[in-house]
Image: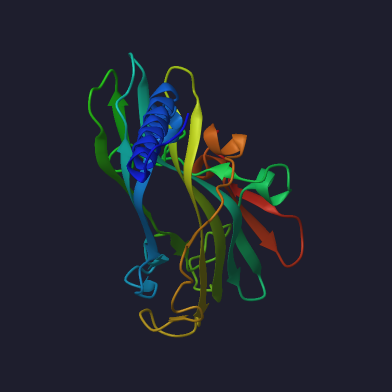
């Protein structure tokens, strides 16, 4: 074919461009994104509050402390759900490491322990609320989309976590309540996942992964009057959580019973003699 003028050349070029553009549009329509690839995390925010751990000496039986809160919040967009599928999107958390020692001078120490985690038999243990496995909770922590839906769904899921335990002033295996507590040490690490799960097929999509850690050291002088015994040492401020650039898979133990609260054991480890189980696991 011979082109008689530059205008004919432009006409041909325009026709080719239109054809290619239409071809691209048709190609996109012929290959739509899968549902799993269309769930979009619009925003994720996570932090640990800046306030230091607070200490409560109002009780003559126990010392109480309250750590700052870890918080995670995500805005999610879910495309129209085809058919009668049901998807739940929310937070799942697991404990990866736990050190929780309460020292009583030269008598020994009490220790909350997760035996399988301590012994390296598992890499993580569920931190579910103990009812809504595998979810951390089922109020603000999750959202369920029941199909079929015709429009996109936008929503927010959020969670928070902190420690608020009681530690006896006296040795836990003694009938005496004479104050002997001399220090509290705690160091725990967690992984928190934003996850979408198909309720029928159990298909699990990890949308975001967060790692965080809470550390604590309290020095106690049992000789001092009640209300003046405990002093918070380092760290006063916690290191902030990390949002991972690459998602991590969820270990199987993080999805099922038991959770950390039911699996933990309170041990008494004397300076001399054999360890004693003070509080056995609940499961």
Q: Residue at x 39, y 35 (%)?
A: 12
Classify 228 as above or below 172.
below
Q: Would you say residue 131 is visible in this rendering?
A: no
Q: Nearer the viewer, residue 16 or 160?
A: 16
Q: Residue at x 55, y 47 (%)?
A: 247
Q: Nearer the viewer, residue 183 or 90?
A: 90
**Residue furthest toward the left?**
151
Q: How many marks?
A: 0
Q: Would you say residue 21 is visible in this rendering?
A: yes
- Residue 126 position in % (x across, y down): 53, 41
Drawn side of residue 91 relative to residue 271, left or right:
left
- Residue 214 position in % (x across, y down): 50, 65
- Residue 51 position in % (x across, y down): 34, 74
Quarter of the image holding residue 66? Answer: bottom left
**Residue furthest toward the front?**
4
- Residue 219 position in % (x across, y down): 52, 80
Classify 116 as above or below 166.
above
């Amino acid at each position: 074919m011979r082109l008689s003028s530059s205008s004919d050349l432009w006409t041909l070029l325009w026709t080719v461009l239109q054809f290619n553009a239409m071809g691209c549009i048709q190609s996109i329509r012929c290959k739509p994104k899968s549902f799993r690839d269309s769930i979009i995390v619009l925003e994720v925010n996570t932090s640990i509050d800046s306030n230091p751990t607070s200490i409560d000496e109002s009780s003559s039986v126990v010392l109480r402390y309250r750590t700052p809160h870890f918080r995670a919040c995500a805005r999610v967009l879910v495309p129209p759900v085809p058919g009668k599928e049901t998807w739940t999107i929310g937070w799942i958390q697991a404990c990866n490491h736990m050190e929780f020692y309460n020292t009583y001078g030269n008598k020994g120490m009490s220790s909350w322990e997760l035996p399988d985690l301590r012994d390296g038999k598992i890499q993580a243990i569920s931190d579910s609320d103990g009812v809504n496995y595998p979810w951390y909770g089922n109020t603000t922590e999750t959202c369920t989309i029941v199909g079929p839906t015709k429009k996109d769904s936008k929503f927010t899921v959020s969670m928070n976590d902190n420690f608020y335990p009681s530690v006896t002033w006296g040795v836990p295996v003694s009938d005496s309540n004479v104050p002997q507590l001399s220090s509290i040490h705690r160091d725990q690490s967690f992984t928190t996942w934003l996850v979408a799960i198909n309720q029928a097929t159990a298909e699990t999509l990890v949308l975001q992964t967060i790692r965080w850690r809470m550390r604590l050291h309290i020095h106690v002088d049992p000789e001092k009057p009640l209300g003046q015994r405990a002093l918070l040492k380092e760290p006063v401020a916690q290191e902030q959580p990390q949002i991972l650039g690459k998602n991590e898979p969820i270990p199987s133990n993080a999805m099922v019973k038991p959770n950390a609260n039911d699996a933990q054991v309170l041990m008494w480890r004397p300076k001399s003699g054999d360890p004693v189980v003070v509080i056995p696991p609940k499961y």
